[in-house]
Image (cartoon, rainbow, N blue to C red):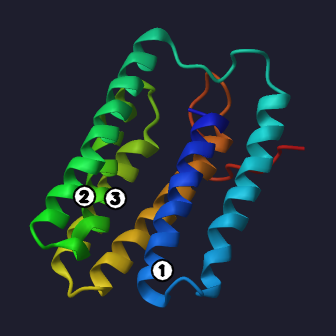
Amino acid sequence: MGPWGALIMSFFGGTFFAAASVIGGGWKNPLLIIPVLVFAGIAGIAQHRIRHAPPGAFEPDARAGRIISWASTAEGVGIPVVAMALANTGHNNLVLPGIAAVVGLHFLPMAYAIPFRPFYALAVFLLLAATAGFLLKQPLGAELAGTAAALALWAASAAALGRKPGAAPNLIAPIVNEG
């Protein structure tokens, strides 16, 4: 896990934040600029890391690559299945917490395979956010689940940016010393 994962997580963090912002304030909500700015910042740092790393430095080994592929495929199938099931049963307001649950579950096998311990915490946090989103009155529950998922994914992106190739993740100062 490194800058490529940070790009992916920050993009989807932005998607969660935008969805939660639209639920809370509509399409003219000024908060919608936040995910654009966060993604641009993370993308800039990721680009710097990728450019200054040896070729293949951030590629997972074959086993981890297979597990990432399977977990991502399951997530890609699970999200529309959960969204459609909730929408078709009259629970449109629970779609965002449902997606947060699927995303959280997909991080569990990846945390083991990469290995990247922050993914365990990320999975737990996303599942807690999803649970709160299901239990709270709507639309507050969906807004909370989406915002919490975004913040968790952005924090994991920062941790991923701080990880040196072949080293344990730096959780204290993920972006410091990047020159």
The quarter of the image holding the N terminus is top right
Is 72 placed above or below 131 here? Answer: above
Please say if the residues under marks 2 and 1 sit with CB atoms less than 8 Å apart.
no
As drawn, is 41 to the left or to the right of 67? right
| Res. 56 mark | none
Please say if the residues under marks 1 and 3 sit with CB atoms less than 8 Å apart.
no
Is 17 placed above or below 27 here? Answer: above
Question: Residue at horizontal 29%, vertical 49%?
Answer: 79
- Label 3: few (<14), some (14–19) or many (≥20) C-alpha neighbours in 10 Å: many
Q: CA distance from mark 2 to mark 1?
A: 17 Å
Q: Nearer the viewer, mark 2 or mark 3?
A: 2
**Residue at mark 1:** 22
Q: Position of residue 96 (x, y in %)?
A: 32, 66
As drawn, is 113 to the left or to the right of 45? left
| Res. 83 mark | 2
Q: Quadrant of residue 73?
A: top left
Is 126 placed above or below 105 here? Answer: below
- Label 1: few (<14), some (14–19) or many (≥20) C-alpha neighbours in 10 Å: some
Amino acid at the residue labelled 2: Ala
Q: CA distance from mark 2 to mark 3?
A: 16 Å
Element marked by disc 3 = helix
**Residue at mark 3:** 126
